[in-house]
Image: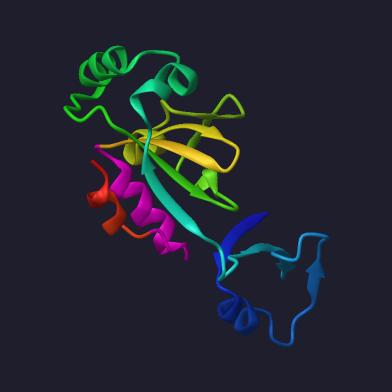
Amino acid sequence: MDTRYVSPEKFSKVSKGKKVVDYPNPWIKDVNGIRHHIINPDMEYKISVLEKKSYPWYLGMTYEEYAKSTNEMFGDDDARVFVLECDWFPTELVAGVANSRYSNTSSLSRKTGWLRSFGVIELFRAEKVEEAISILNKHGFKFDKAQLHKQV
């Protein structure tokens, strides 16, 4: 089944006069065999930088080890890891799948810099996080790229 991400206004237009299949989650509805994820207009978005002391917990290596690894693998000079957070995160838009699981080595993940998912937070390489935000915002999310430049 195809999936689309839409604003409440867009869903209202798409579903007008059509049979809508409802689910217990009020933000998910099907119309004409297409699943629509309606983006809550009141959802809050947060962008932050992972603290260096948290690298071992989230990435399994120290900041220095990660910096060396990401430079060797991707040629990245910036070893910061950005944390994108919202109430409901569409990981499938920014992370590719390999062996039925999200994979940080897939072509989509390499394009967006997606590293890992931890519930409501997603981790991204600093060099590619803008691409991930562009993809998310194109689908109706409202991450503010200006927050990236406020992070040190």
Quadrant of the image for the C terminus? top left
Query: Where 54 sits versus 35, above or below?
Result: above
As for residue 130 lying within the magenta part, the answer is yes
Residue sitting at 35 percent across and 60 percent down?
144
Identify which residue, 79 or 14, lies in the foreground.
79
The quadrant holding residue 18 is bottom right
Q: Is residue 95 left or right of residue 18?
A: left
Q: Is residue 106 left or right of residue 65?
A: right
Residue sitting at 33 percent across and 39 percent down?
111
Residue 143 in picture, x, y percent from top left: 40, 58
Query: Where 114 sits versus 56, above or below?
Result: below
The quadrant holding residue 9 is bottom right
Residue 60 in picture, x, y percent from top left: 45, 14
Quadrant of the image for the N terminus? bottom right
Residue most extreme to the bottom: 17
Q: Which residues are magenta?
A: 127-143
Residue 120 in picture, x, y percent from top left: 57, 43
Residue sitting at 25 percent across and 19 percent down?
67
Q: Is residue 48 left or right of residue 127?
A: right
Identify which residue, 57 or 5, lies in the foreground.
57
Query: Where 63 sits versus 77, above or below?
Result: above
Residue 5 in picture, x, y percent from top left: 56, 63
As for residue 46 lying within the magenta part, the answer is no
Q: Exactly how many numbered labels are in the figure?
A: 0
